[in-house]
Image (tube, rainbow, N blue to C red):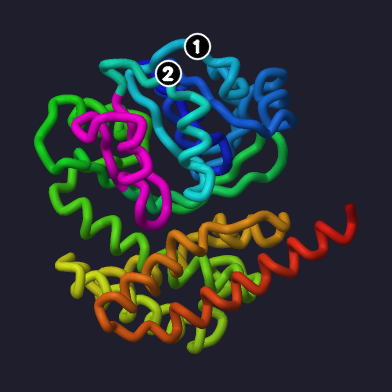
Amino acid sequence: MTITILGAGAMGSLFGGLLAESGEAVTLLDINDAHLRAIRDHGLRLETDAGDRRIRSLTACRPEQATAQPDLLVVFTKTLHTASALAGVAGLIGPRTLVLTLQNGLGNVETVSRFAPIERILIGTTTWPADVAGPGHVRSHGSGGVRIMAADQCEHAGVAKVAETLSRAGLRCTLDRTVWTAVWEKVAFNAALNSLCAVTGCSVDQLGAVPEGMALAGAVIDEVVAVARAEGIAADADHCRQTVAHAIAHHIGHKPSMLQDVLAGRPTEIGAINGAVAEKGRRRGVAVPHTEALLGLVRLIEARAKAAGNSST
């Protein structure tokens, strides 16, 4: 397949690198010029449990420099940038292009559907960890997987081909007819781990240093699952806890994307994760005090970073 990755941060670069390594024609699109330059000059340095290597069979450029319409466009931008990023590459979405969103949070399909018909949109989740170690350098240690399905929940032939392509690259992709359950369970995972790491500065494994870490994560999971069930989604709190416990045990040193954003002084995806859960909880009359507390704390951190940035300019 010809594959374009929109948003070549940690996750986008990991997926793009593994797909290129497996023989797919991959283009990475991003606005981080230093990262793009490093990939063009030296290849993408990828550190995984399979080893440390450089992948040179990648095209890396800014969105406005891309012209070819791919078979598959994978959206890995932050949720707050999705609409503007897709508007900038609308010409790449051809009549046969499938658009896959593996982004965090809620509301992604609604945004993508402004640029592609619902029957060509795929939605999914991934539990692969990834960290940017420097320009052109990404690390991923520990296991993960991908679950996808057509956003309209119909069985399209292209969905199976995408799953096979991702699995051939070692990304362990499965078709999941209960994709919305998977999305909500990933929201529970992120609402617990991402926000806790963002507030505390802990890597994922450090949340297991004291019993309170897992207890707080569990409280958030219970709240998110309660909202999901009020929305008619059969999310499983025990499964979410097992996923979180596995991440704490195995994703050693991993700094989730929200913590990476906090450390870099960037806006986070808290609004599409904890914020979206809190909003839906209010509509359904479901109390989510832990989720809301973490939402408020991350927003305070964002406000502090913004004020520091304004004072320095």
Measured as percent of width and height from the top left, residue 35 is found at 69, 32
Distance between mark 1 and mark 2 Cα atoms: 6 Å
Q: Nearest the camera: 282 or 125?
A: 282
The residue that mark 1 highlights is 67
Q: How many marks?
A: 2
Q: Residues within 10 Å of mark 1 (few under 14, many from 20)?
A: few
Whether residue 307 sits left or right of residue 43 in the image: it is right
* Circle 2 SS class: helix
Q: Nearest the camera: 128 or 47?
A: 128
Q: Quadrant of the N terminus?
A: top left
> From what the image shows, is residue 117 above or below residue 275?
above
Q: Residue placed at 10% from the left, 38% from the top?
A: 154
The range drawn in magenta is 98-124
Three-letter code for the amino acid on which mark 2 is drawn: Leu
Q: Looking at the image, which residue sits at the far right?
A: 312
CB atoms of marks 1 and 2 within 8 Å: yes
> From what the image shows, is residue 208 above or below residue 29?
below
Q: Residue placed at 33% from the left, 49% from the top?
A: 125
Q: Residues within 10 Å of mark 2 (few under 14, many from 20)?
A: some
For the question of whether residue 254 can be seen, the reply is no
Q: Residue placed at 65% from the left, 74% from the top?
A: 300
Measured as percent of width and height from the top left, residue 269 is found at 52, 58
Instruction: State yes or no: residue 115 in magenta.
Output: yes
Whether residue 19 sits left or right of residue 261 in the image: it is left
Q: Nearest the camera: 83 or 61?
A: 83
Measured as percent of width and height from the top left, residue 109 is found at 31, 45
Q: State the image quarter where residue 55 is shown.
A: top right
Instruction: State yes or no: residue 24 in magenta.
Output: no
The residue that mark 2 highlights is 92
Q: Nearest the camera: 62 or 243?
A: 62
On residue 241, the disc is: none
